[in-house]
Structures are given as C-alpha cells and as structure tokens.
Amino acid sequence: MAGPEFPIFEVTLAQRRRRTWNWSVCTVQGAVVMQGREASRPAAKYQAERALFMLLLTAPYRSRLSA
C-alpha cells in the first residue's frame, strides 16, 4: 500500500509598478490557489504565508492523520 500523497505549494512574491507587490500561493504544477496584492513587500510576504497556513489548516488529509 502506497503512502499518502501530499500536495506541495509554493509562495511567490512579485513587484508590480513602484509600490505594489503581488503574492500568490501555487501548486508545483503552476495552478494558482490564492493570490492578492499589497502595498509593501513585508505585507505581501505576511499575507502569502498566512494564506498558505490557512490552506494547510483546511486540507482534507488533516482529518485522516488524526484518526
């Protein structure tokens, strides 16, 4: 029996224009799961990491691990 396969996500930050930072959480295949825009790089980094954390909290495999 093969072990469970867990999804892998990447967080990306990209500067757009002078004062705008875009962030996204993507699968390794490149599909965007969540995205947003912030005024500063630290804010974009925080929001991207927060989104990744919330995504992992709601993952369906969590209930199988605690059983």
Image (cartoon, grey):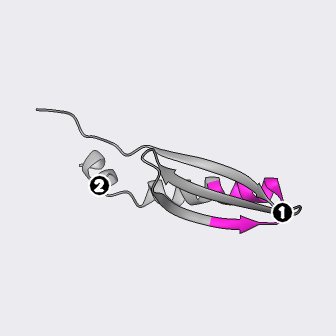
Q: Residue at x 64, y 56 (%)?
A: 48
Q: Which x, y percent locates residue 20?
A: 81, 64
* Residue corresponding to mark 1: 17
Which three-letter amino acid code belongs to the residue tagged 2? Answer: Ser
Residue positioned 29% across, 48% down in the render: 66
* Three-letter amino acid code at the position of disc 1: Arg
Residue 63: assigned label = 2
Q: Residue 5's mark?
A: none
Q: Residue at x 34, y 43 (%)?
A: 6
Apparent side of residue 55 relative to residue 42 in the rendered image (left or right): left
In the foreground, 66 or 5 = 5
Q: Which residues are magenta?
A: 36-48
Q: Residue furthest right?
A: 18
Q: Residue furthest front?
A: 17
Q: Where on the picture, by quarter, is residue 36?
A: bottom right
Disc 1 packing (10 Å; few <14; some 14–19; many ≥20): few
Q: Is residue 48 left or right of residue 16?
A: left
Residue 23, above or below 10: below
Residue 58: % across, % down: 41, 61
Please tell me whether mark 2 sits on a helix, a strand or a loop.
helix
Q: Could you tell which of marks 2 and 1 lies nearer the N-terminus? A: 1
Our reading of the magenta stretch's main secondary structure is: helix
